[in-house]
Image (cartoon, rainbow, N blue to C red):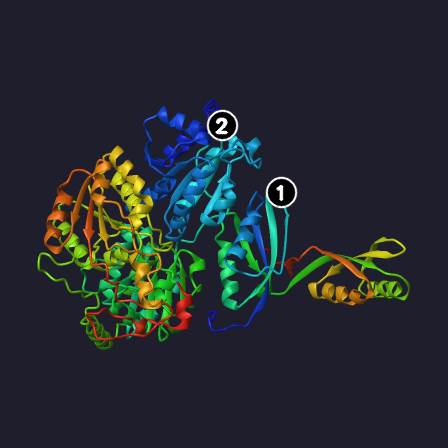
Amino acid sequence: MSAESHQSGAEVLLRALKDQGVEVIFGYPGGAVLPIYDALFNQNAIRHILVRQEGGAVHAAEGYARSTGKVGVVLVTSGPGATNAVTGLVDALMDSIPVVCLTGQVPTHLIGNDAFQEADTTGITRPATKHNYLVKRSEDLARVVHEAFYVARSGRPGPVVIDLPKDIVINKAPYTEAAPQHPSYRPQTEPDAAQIARAVALLKQAKRPMIYTGGGVINAGPAAAETLVKFVRASGFPITNTLMGLGAYPASDPQFLGMLGMHGTYEANLAMHGCDVLLAVGARFDDRVTGRLNAFSQGSRKIHIDIDGSSINKNVPVDVPVIADAGRALEALYAEWMAAPGQVDTASLTAWWRQIDAWRAKDSLKFSQEMAPGSLIKPQYAIQRLYEITRSLKKEVFITTEVGQHQMWAAQHFHFEKPNHWMTSGGLGTMGYGLPAAMGVQIAHPDALVVDIAGEASILMNIQEMGTLAQYRLPVKVFILNNQYMGMVRQWQELLHGGRYSETYSAALPDFVKLADAFHAKGLRAENVGQLDSVIHAMLESPTAVIADIAVDPAENCFPMIPSGAAHNEMLLGPEHAASGAGITDEGLVLV
Amino acid sequence: MPSSSDTTQRSATISVLVDNEAGVLARVIGLFSGRGYNIDSLTVAPVDAAGLHSRINVVTSGTAMVIEQIKAQLDRLVPVHRVADLTQDGPHVAREMALVKVIGAGEKRVEALRIADTFRARVVDTTTESFVFELTGATDKLDAFIELMRDLGLAEVSRTGVAALARGKRTIG
């Protein structure tokens, strides 16, 4: 035993967290973690943010992690504390967000006895995490904490649970430094030079190239996004981002075709469909992106760069697989592009851009807003105004969302120039993500403007976190597009289920202005287009948290849309366009 | 490159070297059940003197794309050190052991013993009305033996699942 074995497990835990650079923990106390809270009470190095429900803690840690590039840390108690955290853990798993979640556990001698607030946390969270640990011996504690942080942030990042029996945090434990190398988990980060050379050779021969990047570029850090921009500009190729990848490439750049996928732009999806060489970086060919798999980009040779080997050839077979960190691979790709002989076929590329511009001219995100002051607000217009008004602000602007129509409209109409400024639940699609995520972002960036673009249904799923905003004076702005429906489900019912709006009407909604007031925040409401700008200005000027309840057109649908089971070239465009696209097939009906 | 249109199923014997720690088998089994992969047979035991590492041998089947996925998914588990596809990587030996209980009398009992002899099965327990045979070999040999015993009083079977190694000097480490 080392000289420092006079420290309790809880003290050793906090020391290890501090050594890992942890500044903030999002948590909620309970019986099994009392010794840890006692140790927190006696120190000032780590700040604890008391959430109102454990699920909120994990989303807050996700928002913190996504906006800083650091690992988000959660502390919850045993049993219900841990089970409440599960949704957030799966969310972080699906979206590759580095989170370490410390869960309390009953003392080791009671494990398996159905003790009070006992749950098989490692059993429950095994498929919900990248990895998990149950610490059964004091001498393992410090090592496991260091290892958990390494696992959470290395390779494809993800959530890691450390289950801590109460006796382990009470008993004395030795401290150990982080080991220089993990015995088994060593993800490949350097790209294979030969594969990069093959990729560049393929790209240089392309007549109709397309670049598609995802959250992996964001996770690889801001330098990866900068390299991406250099490469895209040097090549002159068109680029699209996934929902998770928005911000990796500046939205205002003419080479950017907007988001792709189910609610992506016409030009992005048709360019995916028609390209002859496709470069995918840090994206996983998710079903929301590919549409019908057997019709997905059939004429293209594909290059796929991903740090997770299991993402390659999972849904779509590729010609040039590159297992590597997106940033390292993009650097190698850029260097090889500049060094390798051979020129791009500029005549073909020009013709390709002409085609893309013709698709772009369709203006697939078009909507029409009546401007008479008493008119109903179109949700797209509300986001467009929010974007335009916040653009001129002299502060950083971070956007989080809940899940549904408002999320897709935000992705379409709020434009991101930089990575790490857009936080949304992509893979799991967790309603209730946005408010706690915004909380985590605001903790990390106290002077920034943080807006949760929400729906009136989603926001109620974690509304209790308004209490956290009040306690820590976090000036988060909740911008609710209130269409009185679970809009995306209603849209599918309209398109697929004969307009039978089964249980999607948001009945008995609260008065959001009074609700804000009850939580010591400012409540605002815009009923019509004439009130919209002044509500946005009042929201931005308020030094406190705000709920802005924006009444929007309840009938508006989110277009363009690739119906489930349809291909990229079978998009439905909105009512602004003449009848287009395919109907929904029987096979499509069973998909989600 | 595996093609998504190739629907040919193949069998694969995959060996996985893992840390010998609590939960590691659950992780591997959970991966197979959670992602809908087949497990035709599975064995696990510590394989070094210190008991630090276990070897899991899993016999699975699927299309080429699915088997690639299985290997990639196994490979990214944190306690996994090595994944080897013995079926694909070259010649290998795969053996399992079965204990087969046969109950019967008279001519059938004699016939069971005669067949057991042909298969080089050993009698490890006997009463006047029953035998327990121990048989080691490739999976199809065990299948054939058990099939033959069906008409001769087959009562119960216990099989170990497959243990497998690459032929020659190649090792998983």
Q: Nearer the viewer, residue A63 or B116?
A: A63
B137 to the left or right of A43: right
Residue type beneath disc 1: Gly
- Establish if A269 lies above or below A418: below
Count of numbered tags: 2
Left or right, A401 with respect to A292, comes to: left
The quarter holding residue A377 reads bottom left
Q: Residues within 10 Å of mark 1 (few under 14, many from 20)?
A: few
Residue A13 visible in the shown view: yes
Q: Where is residue B162, by image quadrant?
A: bottom right
Q: Which mark is residue A173?
A: 2
Q: Position of residue A54 (x, y in %)?
A: 38, 39
Position above or below: A168 against A477: above
Q: Is residue A577 left or right of residue A330?
A: left
- Image point 45% across, 59% down: which residue? A310
Q: Nearer the viewer, residue A110 or A225?
A: A110
Nearest to the eye among marks 1 and 2: give it. 2
User: Residue A455: percent from the left, percent from the top?
Assistant: 27, 52
Q: Residue at x 67, y 61 (%)?
A: B94
Tell me, for residue A153, which label it has, or none: none
- The subunit carrying tag 1 is B
Estimate the x, y position of residue A200 in percent, counting from the top left: 33, 67
At label 2, counting other C-alpha atoms closer than 10 Å, the crowd grade (few under 14, some 14-19, many 20 or more) is: many
Q: Which residue is mark 1?
A: B51
- What SS does tag 1 mark? loop
| Same-subunit check for callouts 1 and 2 | no
Q: Position of residue B28 (x, y in %)?
A: 55, 52
| Residue occupying the point 53% across, 63% down | B67
Mark 1–mark 2 distance (CA, rounded to whole Å): 25 Å
| Helix, strand or loop for disc 2 | loop
Q: Is residue A342 above or below residue A431?
A: below
Q: Split into 4 quadrants, where in the image is the C terminus of chain A? A: bottom left
